[in-house]
Image: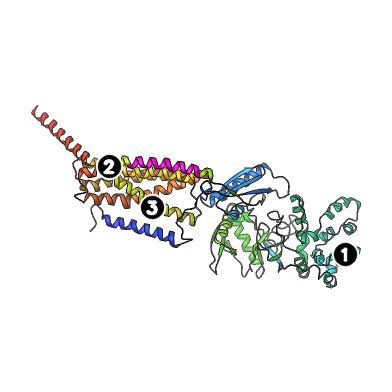
Amino acid sequence: MAPPAGQIRPAKYLGAFVLIVVALYSLVFFTGNGKATPKLGIDLQGGTRVTLTARAPDGKTPSEESLNQARTLIETRVNGLGVAGPEVIRDGTNLVITVPGSDSEGAKRLGQTAKLNFRKVIGSPVPNAPEPAPTESSAPSTSGSAAPTTTGSAAPDASAGKEPTETASVAPTTAQGRPAPALEGQPETTTPPADPSASAQPPAEEKPQVDCRAVFQGQYSDDPTRAIEESRTCRQDPQLTTLDAQTVSQALTAFTCPTVDPLIGNDDPALPLLTCDQDRTEKYVLAPVTPPTDGSVKDDDFSLYSRLTGEDIDNAVSGTDPQGAGFVVDLTFKGEGGDKWGKFTSANVSQQVAVVLDSQVVSAPNINEPILGGSTQISGKFSQTEATSLANVLKYGSLPLSFEASEAETVSATLGLASLQAGLIAGGIGLALVFVYCLFYYRLLGVLTILSLVLSAVVVYAVLVLLGRWIGFTLDLAGIAGFIVAIGITADSFVVFFERLKDEMREGRSFRSAVPRAWVRARRTILSADMVSFLASAILYVLAVGQVKGFAFTLGMSTVLDLIVVFLVTHPLVAMVSKSKRLSNPKLSGLGGAAQAGVDDRALSGAKSTAVKEV
């Protein structure tokens, strides 16, 4: 039989609270690294700072608009990761990202351009094995295909005379079947075939400056603008899509994956692309993303052009790989994007499609059958952090600029620790005064208040550790301020309950009978007050950025935990005390004054009614 309204079985509620605490601390000690230490923010533990140097797609100085847009997008990515506490500051044409701890790679990932394309793979990928340059210097020249293909235009080879042995190892470089780049790589011989007329002479004078043989060996200009131009000229030649399989293979063999690729995030989707995967273990020739605008390709022809970019993505979610170990990113396309994906996969069954992120191949799966559901999956050698980060940047869109990250540098936490020490001293003094006041005013009920606050802190600490482990939550000074404010909200709940209890006793009820009635009425007020506080925190969290977001998060979380403590600890403890003859003694419980005030009020009321009757 259920107890009357307001009456509870205290042991049942306290047991539920104990189970919650045991479950939380089991997760703390037996999952993750097993350490019961929360992650601290930049101002408390220091951090790692990475400076991102912006590069516009054309290599020129980035505009104000593009820099501000990039900063806004990076801040959105930061907020999408939760409340981990990174900072994004603009410094001239640079963006400075600071993350807590020593996660320099995390800071660099936040500055990832995230330019996503889907490109058809032309031919077969080739392993990025180092080429023995000196020993094979004569072999390529005798390989039959080397001389003709180097030429792509036989004239340069003929005019080069003695160069076949010199360039034999790079002969396939020009042999990539790219006649125009081959000419560019050999200046003296490029002019006659490429420029039959004098009017074309000026471009011919500029092109010889692009040495595709050097580019294919990973040697680029020190000037970022020039390096991008060299990469596009040699690695995005329009003729790459028209070559035979043998020439494509030779181009891939000659190409060396660069350690630092200036083309990252700067490739032209309307041109083919010669690139590598993210691990620089495989080399690919990829088809253009978009067809020419001259109408030579029909709108329904998806045999070569996918027409799919990151702008067609509606949502991206990371998760575990259902077919094995590791993590994947599940993509959902917008309506038109899903239609494009269905047509492209239908036209390219048994072909490879490369998922290209910032000019590098993430994965290149085979298309086994048409995919018509409007979704797909990016698989690769992702860790959980990498998959989550990739899903985050794809979800919020690509940056208008590409960035080159500097070496990470350490940020000191000296100032923050000094502020924390001062804040803890002030908070400790304030909390001690609250405890003294509670003991003086509520006596035994004040002890229950202190005990409830301590148990609330136990739960909050465990949640902090787990949130730091699961979503990267970091505790900073703003978060601590949120917890301090929440202490007042929690104490306010106790005050509401105790004052309502006093009101019931003034009306002549005993301590034991007053508890259930007071709880029923106080419960509504507590729920209403906490709901208002939580809604304010939620709105602040949605609208704010940076550390203010952390303040709102901790305030809202503490408000929710306040309800757990009040319902599962404070109320059951008060109910237990009310059933004890010794503990419910009015002098000990602090409710004697309220009971006596009730007696006096009733006596005065009785005296007044008697006087009225006599009159």
State whether residue 15 is above or below residue 606: below
The quarter in which the C terminus is drawn is: top left
Q: Residue at x 71, y 65 (%)?
A: 283
Q: Amino acid at mark 2?
A: Tyr
Give the mark nearer the N terminus: 2 vs 1. Answer: 1
Q: Amino acid at mark 3?
A: Val
Residue corresponding to mark 1? 163
Relative depth, front residue between 179 and 474: 474
Query: Can you tell which quarter of the image residue 93 is in?
Result: top right
Find the distance from the CA under tag 2 to the CA under tag 1: 97 Å
Relative depth, front residue between 479 and 37: 37
Find the distance from the CA under tag 1 to the CA under tag 3: 77 Å
Q: How busy is the neighbourhood of tag 3: few (under 14 within 10 Å), some, or many (20 plus)?
A: some
Q: Tell me if label 2 and label 1 are in contact, CB under 8 Å.
A: no
Q: How busy is the neighbourhood of tag 1: few (under 14 within 10 Å), some, or many (20 plus)?
A: some
Residue corresponding to mark 2? 442
Q: Position of residue 63 (x, y in %)?
A: 69, 43
In the picture, measured across the screen, residue 427 lies left or right of residue 337, that is left
For the residue labelled by badge 2, is the local secondary structure a helix, a strand or a loop?
A: helix
Q: How busy is the neighbourhood of tag 2: few (under 14 within 10 Å), some, or many (20 plus)?
A: many
Mark closer to the observer (2, 1): 2
Magenta-tinted stretch: 417-435
For the residue labelled by badge 3, is the local secondary structure a helix, a strand or a loop?
A: helix
Q: Position of residue 185 (x, y in %)?
A: 83, 59
Q: Which mark is residue 458?
A: 3
